[in-house]
Amino acid sequence: MSKPKYPIGPLQIPEVVTESQRDKAVQTLKEFPEMLIELLHALPDAKLDRPYRDGSWTIRQLVHHISDSHNHSYNRIRWALTEDSPLIKAYDQDAFATMDDYKTMSIDWSLKHIEVLHYKMVYIYESLSNQDWKKQWIHPETKKVMTVEQTACMYAWHSMHHYTQIKNGLL
């Protein structure tokens, strides 16, 4: 079960995001929920409860993580669009993954959440002006400034990164 941690390569967010990169990110975010639902359709608990690679979370934990992580993304873009360079709230994803809901809850609710969340994110992204894409937020721990367009690229990567980890974990 020796599978790579970054099966599609590590995250590389462009300093300057092109319109083509934005469009590709939005398209990925649009297609991701259906791809994930199809991949996980009717998967037995035994497969959901095994790690997707050595020393990793289970596939179930990973699905719940995607749901929560992308919820943070949704909030970050809304804050960036409505406030002046807001300092966002960070969270401990590993602590979240140790909670009982991540370990035992059906993935159905998280899949539905991802589907709705992505619909809402894509709806917002498709309505943005060029000026809106440049709005930004600040991470409280790293002090890194991220634009809305960089956020779209980051979560498109995050979607496919975890999709590929799950797909590889099912092999």
Image (tube, rainbow, N blue to C red):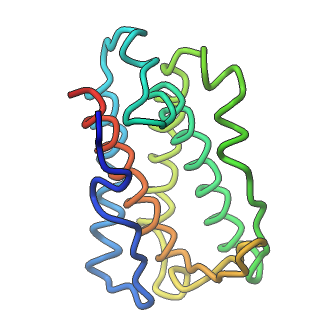
Residue occupying the point 38% across, 59% down: 156
Compared across the picture, whether 1 is left or right of 119 comes to left
Q: Is residue 130 above or below residue 127?
A: below
Q: Quadrant of residue 142?
A: bottom right
Instruction: Give the quarter of the figure containing the N terminus.
Output: top left
Residue occupying the point 38% across, 85% down: 17
Residue occupying the point 33% across, 14% down: 43
Compared across the picture, whether 36 is left or right of 86 comes to left
Q: Position of residue 44 (x, y in %)?
A: 36, 8
Q: Residue furthest left?
A: 171
Instruction: Give the quarter of the figure containing the C terminus.
Output: top left
Q: Quadrant of residue 84?
A: bottom right
Q: Position of residue 128 (x, y in %)?
A: 48, 74
Q: Which of the two residues, 139 or 9, is positioned nearer the viewer here? A: 9
Q: Position of residue 74 (x, y in %)?
A: 60, 55
Q: Is residue 122 above or below residue 49?
A: below
Q: Which of the two residues, 2 or 88, is positioned nearer the viewer here? A: 2
Q: Is residue 34 above or below residue 88?
A: above
Q: Quadrant of residue 81?
A: bottom right
Q: Which of the two residues, 18 or 168, is positioned nearer the viewer here? A: 168
Compared across the picture, whether 128 is left or right of 99 comes to left
Q: Is residue 127 above or below residue 138?
A: above
Residue occupying the point 51% across, 69% down: 151
